[in-house]
Image (spheres, grey):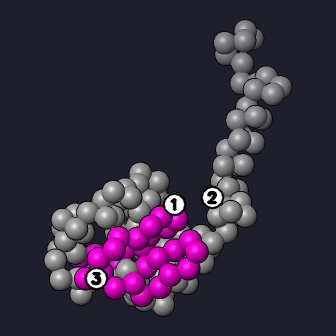
Amino acid sequence: RDRAHSREVPVGGAAPHLLRKRANQAYDLFPPARNRFLLGLEAIADQYSPRGDLVVVNGGMDPQFMYFLHRRGWSVSDAESHDPKRLRELVREGASYLFVIRAEPPHDPGLPIVYQDAQVTVLRLKTAQH
């Protein structure tokens, strides 16, 4: 048999790729110490928001925060999370809460803070008067 039709995998050919793939999956399931707070996002969300609520989180293009919240909704940039016009649009589309992760929350009296710790701020959007 010639090498072009061989099904044998060269030593070291696929193994590094598979190891990298498994390592990436492990990171998703077991975040490093600086991100362990993510494991508590769902419990925080459960205190204020039923599972069916649509939420907004300042995750940008990264779906990780939404994944750990176990909610559906929108992942927006930090700038969008501070844009009153964009937040009004999201409220009209059904958003109930804004989760701000590792960033300064918007300063708007119409957005009451219902929870805050060193990493996470939760603001109620449903009652926002915009």
| Residue 109 appears left or right of 77 | left
Whether residues under marks 3 and 2 lie with C-beta atoms below 8 angstroms apart, the answer is: no
Relative horizontal placement of residue 37, taking residue 14 as reference (left or right): left
Q: Quadrant of residue 52?
A: bottom left
Residue position for label 2: 28
Distance (Cα) linking label 3 and label 1:
29 Å
Amino acid at the residue labelled 2: Asp
Tag 2: Cα neighbours inside 10 Å, few (<14), some, or many (≥20)? few
Q: Position of residue 28 (x, y in %)?
A: 63, 58
Q: Would you place residue 63 above or below residue 120 in this image?
A: above
Q: Which residue is mark 3?
A: 109
In screen coordinates, is 1 left or right of 124? Answer: right
Residues drawn in magenta: 94-122
Task: Give amino acid for label 1.
Answer: Gln
Q: How busy is the neighbourhood of tag 1: few (under 14 within 10 Å), some, or many (20 plus)?
A: few
Q: Quadrant of residue 119?
A: bottom right
> Where is the C terminus found, in terms of image quarters?
bottom left
Residue toward you, 12 or 77: 77
Q: Residue 64 shows which numbered tag?
A: 1
